[in-house]
Amino acid sequence: MTELKDGSFIRDCVEEECRNTALIENLITENAALRAELAALKSANGWRKCHEELPPFNSRVHVFTSFGDQYIAILCQLGECDMQWNLEASAYYSGENFDIVTHWRELPTPPEVE
């Protein structure tokens, strides 16, 4: 058995099959890189739980509420301790209602206008 760079093993091969060993190692390396890239993309575009992480203050984000509604909103700081979600739908959630917004994610990059 031959150990590959990622710690896995392949069976030793006869001379004509050995040419494939380098190909297999390259495919394993490429696969790992693509999986890492996919995980990064999912993380960058995915929903974030508000109880784990909040967006920066005064930045526009896409939010999801416990009612199943979606809005564009801005997280504002009120004084030193209080926060408020200002929704572009002319509503806001603060105080006891702050937790109505359960998830958020960054807005996508707008398209370039030609």
Image: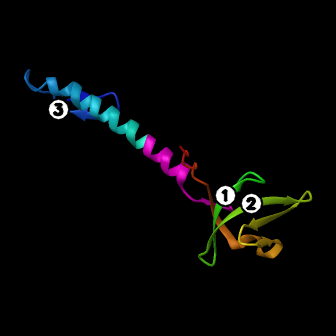
Residue found at the very far top of the displayed protein: 15
Image check: 42 left or right of 59? Answer: left
Which residue, given by chain and number where applicable, does mark 1 sit on?
Answer: 61
The answer to whether 57 is drawn above or below residue 28 in the figure is: below
> Disc 1 on helix, strand or loop?
strand
Tell me the quarter of the image containing the N terminus: top left
> Which is in the foreground here, disc 3 or disc 1?
1
Image check: 23 left or right of 36? Answer: left
Which residue, given by chain and number where applicable, does mark 2 sit on?
Answer: 74
**Disc on the earlier residue, 1 or 2:** 1
Residue name at image x 77 percent, y 66 percent: 86
What is the spatial separation of the Cα atoms under label 1 and label 2, in whole angstroms?
Answer: 6 Å
Q: Where residue 16 sits in the image (x, y, percent)?
A: 7, 23
Residue found at the very far right of the displayed protein: 79
- Give the main secondary structure of the magenta stretch: helix
- Looking at the rendered structure, the kind of residue marked 1 is Val
Image check: 50 left or right of 90? Answer: left
Which residue, given by chain and number where applicable, does mark 3 sit on?
Answer: 11
Q: Where residue 106 sits in the image (x, y, percent)?
A: 62, 54
Residue name at image x 20 percent, y 27 percent: 21
Range of magenta residues: 37-51
Image check: 26 left or right of 45? Answer: left
- Looking at the rendered structure, the kind of residue marked 3 is Arg
Front in this rendered view, residue 59 or 95: 59
Q: What number of labels is visible?
A: 3
**Disc on the earlier residue, 3 or 2:** 3
